Amino acid sequence: MRIAQIAPLAESVPPKLYVGTERVAWLVDELVHLGHTVTLFASGDSTTRAKLHPVWPRALRLGRPRVDPKLAVAILLEAISRRAREFDIIHSHIDWLHLPLLTRLGIPFVTTMHGRLDLPGIPETLREFPDACFVSISDNQRTPIRSATELTDRQSMIDGAAPIAGMPLRIAAKLPRGEAAYFKRHIEPQIDGTETQLIGEVDERGKQPFLSGAAALLVPIKWPEPFGLVMIEAIACGTPVIAYRAGSVPEVIDQGVSGFIVDGQEEAVQAVKNLAWIDRHVVRARFEERFTSDRMARAYVGHYEQLASTVPQAAAALRWVRSSRPALGIALVASRCAMRSIRSRFPARVGSRRRKGEVQHLPQRRRAERHRNSRVVPDAVIAEP
């Protein structure tokens, strides 16, 4: 299949530092490995086995000088609009921004939602695009909930089980600018630099040894985590995960096999003490069974094929005509989608019968020849694979 993948422009693909959505690189490269023709719309500093369409020279978050993200997104949408007819399926990872465009292009598309779906305004947005297809990254994600979690609940990220259980705690995280004041007030005072250390943002090279060298990954979340990529990254390293029961955690962690699902700090402390029960080889085996890029790519291909098969034959014909004969394509759009409006504005020219005098001046042979020729273009178009 000819597949377009649309990645966010905030980070490169794969990202230079630690983020989640831009791990679409795993999917893209695996689709290429399976024999598909893949084009990746992403920042110019991305690295991929697919064909790269560099929308913006560098990823926006780390790029200098800083630019308005809306400018880059405008160029991204324009690039997709120009090239949409080249693809059998378009797969977007940029949330909602593409929906008004892709719903009007007539090309099958699917959107993977990587963020929360329990936020205000999302139900209203979904109602505006009833024909759009979405993929959730967990069962819990697509069950919108109202969270009463307060800002101060984030202190639980430091009030963890490891120090209490007599083990050192190492925290790898990026600190957004908007959270600097909160960090200074609530988090930093609890970092003593010995038992509890802030490592900072971990890059690609340092992430694997950081996770594989840990006794466990502690995920004390109190929000509806849509998936939690870091959990399967730890599992891939054979490192068990101790996570609070929230969001997608029960779907990702196999209790007592790849880690422990806990309800609060006391249970987390006990889980740290029970880590000897976990076989790290079994943890890795669970990753191979459930979370490989091959398994993910093959599942997506199934969705792609299902969506592509639902495209009406007329839409496939229109796609072919547009790519090779733009003027005829525009005429077809008008005749299919706006005939009533055109008839109301130009009643004498569109949708009305020819006058007898106009037809009578044509010889019978020419009328028959014209009738046969009028069927050649649609027949040839529909036959296009």
Image (cartoon, helix red, strand yellow):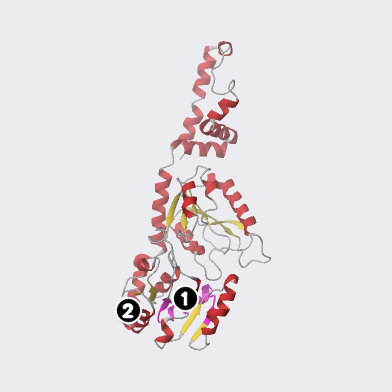
* In the displayed structure image, the side of residue 253 where residue 33 appears, left or right: right
Looking at marks 1 and 2 on the same chain, the residue that comes earlier in the sequence is marked by 1
Q: Secondary structure at mark 1?
A: helix
Residue 55 lies, in percent from the top left, at 61, 56
Residue, x 49% and y 34% (percent of image)? Answer: 381
Region in magenta: 198-218
- The front one of 151 and 250 is 151
Q: Amino acid at mark 1?
A: Gln
Give yes or no for residue 210 being in the magenta stretch.
yes
Which residue matches tag 2? 279
Residue 37 lies, in percent from the top left, at 49, 52
Which residue matches tag 1? 208
Residue 13 lies, in percent from the top left, at 54, 63
Residue, x 57% and y 49% (percent of image)? Answer: 80
Inspect this view and state whether residue 286 appears: yes
**Vertical comparison of 252 with 184: above or below:** above
Residue, x 36% and y 73% (percent of image)? Answer: 284
Q: Amino acid at mark 2?
A: Asp
Q: Residues within 10 Å of mark 2 (few under 14, many from 20)?
A: some
Residue 247 lies, in percent from the top left, at 40, 66
